Image (cartoon, grey):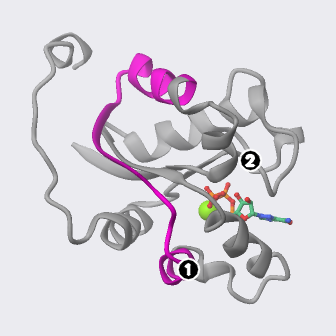
Amino acid sequence: MEQTYVMIKPDGVARGLMGEILSRIEKKGLKIAAMKLAVMEESKAKEHYAEHAARPFFPGLVEFITSAPSLSLIVEGKDAIKIMRALNGATKPAEAAFGTIRGDFAMDTGRNIVHASDSPEAAAREIKIHFGNDKILSYKRSVDAYLY
Ligand code: RTP
Ligand code: MG
């Protein structure tokens, strides 16, 4: 099964949206394979967003992501990468469709609540950054027999 890295950013945690977002992920049929609530280290935030290092919003983005607890997840399922991006919605909340997490709950690009890896390469890279040293549990869900 494909795995992707998902983050509920500090705004999502602080706004009390963890349960809502986890519920959407689970109801869709995706499996939460790992989960960690922590304040992200600055070095990890910089590595995570390295592709944006030269952009003007980079310092503010790193400062925000490390400012308060965020929830890191490994989410698993068939086509998990594409499906998670679709659940999140467009980066800019004004362009995000209603029914998506950003479309329903966000107002500003810099406070768009969630992140999800955008390719298999990014997923592998980001899972390594955020869960590289952790033991990932393996467990079965009875629902999987009805999803696939
Ligand atoms: P993410 O990486 O967080 O899942 O978001 P994304 O793929 O939809 O968007 P990306 O282009 O990778 O941008 C990363 C994050 O940087 C912030 N951003 N701010 N102020 C701005 O113009 C601006 N542009 C991007 C957003 O928080 C975006 O999610
Ligand atoms: Mg991105």
Q: Residues within 10 Å of mark 2 (few under 14, many from 20)?
A: many
Identify the residue under disc 1. Answer: 42
134 to 26, vertically: above or below: below
Q: CA distance from mark 1 to mark 2?
A: 19 Å
97 to 126, vertically: above or below: above
Dot 1 and dot 2 residues touching (CB under 8 Å): no
Return the x and y of residue 2 as percentages of the image width and height: 28, 47
Q: Which mark is in front, 1 or 2?
A: 1
Residue 24 tag number = none
- Based on the displayed image, in which of its 4 quarters is residue 121 positioned? bottom left
* Residue at the (55%, 74%) spot, across then down: 45
State the residue lying farthest toward the top. Answer: 146
Return the x and y of residue 76 as percentages of the image width and height: 30, 40
* Residue at the (61%, 68%) spot, across then down: 66
> The C terminus is located in which quarter?
top left
110 to 87, vertically: above or below: below
Can you tell me whether the CB of the residue at mark 1 lies under 8 Å from the nearest atom of ligand 1?
no
- Specify start and end residues of the magenta stretch as a single range: 20-47
Can you tell me whether the CB of the residue at mark 2 lies under 8 Å from the nearest atom of ligand 1?
yes
Q: Amino acid at mark 2?
A: Asn
Check disc 2 and report its element: helix, strand or loop. loop
Question: Mark 2 or mark 1, which is nearer the start of the sequence?
Answer: 1
104 relative to 74 in the view: left or right: right
Identify the residue under disc 2. Answer: 112
* Residue at the (20%, 63%) spot, across then down: 134
Return the x and y of residue 133 as percentages of the image width and height: 21, 71
Query: If the picture is divided into quarters, which one holds ligand 2?
Result: bottom right
User: What number of labels is visible?
Assistant: 2
Check if residue 31 falls in the magenta segment.
yes
> The N terminus is located in which quarter?
top left
* Residue at the (67%, 28%) spot, across then down: 100
